């Protein structure tokens, strides 16, 4: 009996030692590893939809900076190369290169799914193509200053679909219209619609070369009206914008009783005293208005050509900043 009891005691001791020395530490390690996998930490490499990057900072719902966020914890993440779409799932990957590879594969699949071998479409010729049966889908790329505007424009345009043509927003994004957007539009036979954003210089040149129709708006209703009228064959623009020149703001001055005057350099074209102007900051349209004053040194000027400096102030607008781009343009009647 004593031998049997001793054996049982020894077995229990061995089991206890085995549990505390091996099983319990392993369970703790697995639990900790799982918690690490389920949490998002500063420095993690992340992918969400077509966006990727590394977590540079996180803030909770009270605006406090946090270094780690567990499951069901709402946080604002800084570090993406672009703004993900609403509803995209965020994933953590182990290698930076893998995140870029995942995004490229997703982009390739998106393009492959959307590409169609059609003649180039424009709002001006939309009704004729519909009447001839050449167009069944109107592909549109939407770019805007904020994600909320992208979704609003997308939803409003897609509601215009009818039995003859389906309006499809094949891509939406935040920021200036880029050369990549134009190439995507060219390959997928799409129109580019920008809301409160402008095409950069590369995008303008690419759009002209690829014959891509780019439309920019400040009011969502105007975009909807243009597309709707084009689908009905009533699109007859009375005026079109003619760009005169582009001006780079190099410094600003506050003048009492006058407001902010920009010391600027005319990069392209020219700027005329009676032109309308658009202030663009990081590809986003900040303001549209009229020139209040245009000067060369201390003298009033009717126009200033490319390669020359000037002083310019804008009517009822003082938030001009160094680095802004000012686009000068006029509206001319279109003969159709």
Image: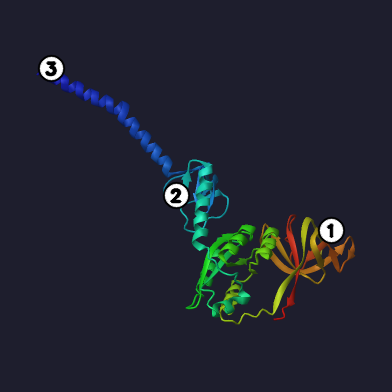
Residue at 54% from the left image edge and 62% from the top image edge: 171
Q: Quadrant of residue 195?
A: bottom right
Give the Cα separation between the discs numbered 3 and 2.
57 Å
The disc, 3 or 2, on the residue closer to the chain's N-terminal end is 3
Question: Which residue has dot 1 on it?
Answer: 307
Q: Is residue 203 visible?
A: yes
Q: Are marks 2 and 1 in contact (CB under 8 Å)?
A: no
Where residue 270 appears, x then y in whole percent? 81, 65
Give the Cα separation between the discs numbered 3 and 1.
105 Å
Foreground: disc 3 or disc 1: 1
Q: Give 105 or 252, whichever is nearer the viewer.
A: 105
Label 3 Cα neighbours within 10 Å, binned few <14 / some 14-19 / many ≥20: few
Where residue 280 appears, x then y in whole percent? 70, 61
Q: Give 141 or 281, whichever is nearer the viewer.
A: 141
Q: Which mark is residue 3?
A: 3
Residue 200 position (above or below residue 98): below
Question: Which residue has dot 2 on it?
Answer: 73
Where residue 255 appears, x then y in whole percent? 82, 60
């Amino acid at each position: 009996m004593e031998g049997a009891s001793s054996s049982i005691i020894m077995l229990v001791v061995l089991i206890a030692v085995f549990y505390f020395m091996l099983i319990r530490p392993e369970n703790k390690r697995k639990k900790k590893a799982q918690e690490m996998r389920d949490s998002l930490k500063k420095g993690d490499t992340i992918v969400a939809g077509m966006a990727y990057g590394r977590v540079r900072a996180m803030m909770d719902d009270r605006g406090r900076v946090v270094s780690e966020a567990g499951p069901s914890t709402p946080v604002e993440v800084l570090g993406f190369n672009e703004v993900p779409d609403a509803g995209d799932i965020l994933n953590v990957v182990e290698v930076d290169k893998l995140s870029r590879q995942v995004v490229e594969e997703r982009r390739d699949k998106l393009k492959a799914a959307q590409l169609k071998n059609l003649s180039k479409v424009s709002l001006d010729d939309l009704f004729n193509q519909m009447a001839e049966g050449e167009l069944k889908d109107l592909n549109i790329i939407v770019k805007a200053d904020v994600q909320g505007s992208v979704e609003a424009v997308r939803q409003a345009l897609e509601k215009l679909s009818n039995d003859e043509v389906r309006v499809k927003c094949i891509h939406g994004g935040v920021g200036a219209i880029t050369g990549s957007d134009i190439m995507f539009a060219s390959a997928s036979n799409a129109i580019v619609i920008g809301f409160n954003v402008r095409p950069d210089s590369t995008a303008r040149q690419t759009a002209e070369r690829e014959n891509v129709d780019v439309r920019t708006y400040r009011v969502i209703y105007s975009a909807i009206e243009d597309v709707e009228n084009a689908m009905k064959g009533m699109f007859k623009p009375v005026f079109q914008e003619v760009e005169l020149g582009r001006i780079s703001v190099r410094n600003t001055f506050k003048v009492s009783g006058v407001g902010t005057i920009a010391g600027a350099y005319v990069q392209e074209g020219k700027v005329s005293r009676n032109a309308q102007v658009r202030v663009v900051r990081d590809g986003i349209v900040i303001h549209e208005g009229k020139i209040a004053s245009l000067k060369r040194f201390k003298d009033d000027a009717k126009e200033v050509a490319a390669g020359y400096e000037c002083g310019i102030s804008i009517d009822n607008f003082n938030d001009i900043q160094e680095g802004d781009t000012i686009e000068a343009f006029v509206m001319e009647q279109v003969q159709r």
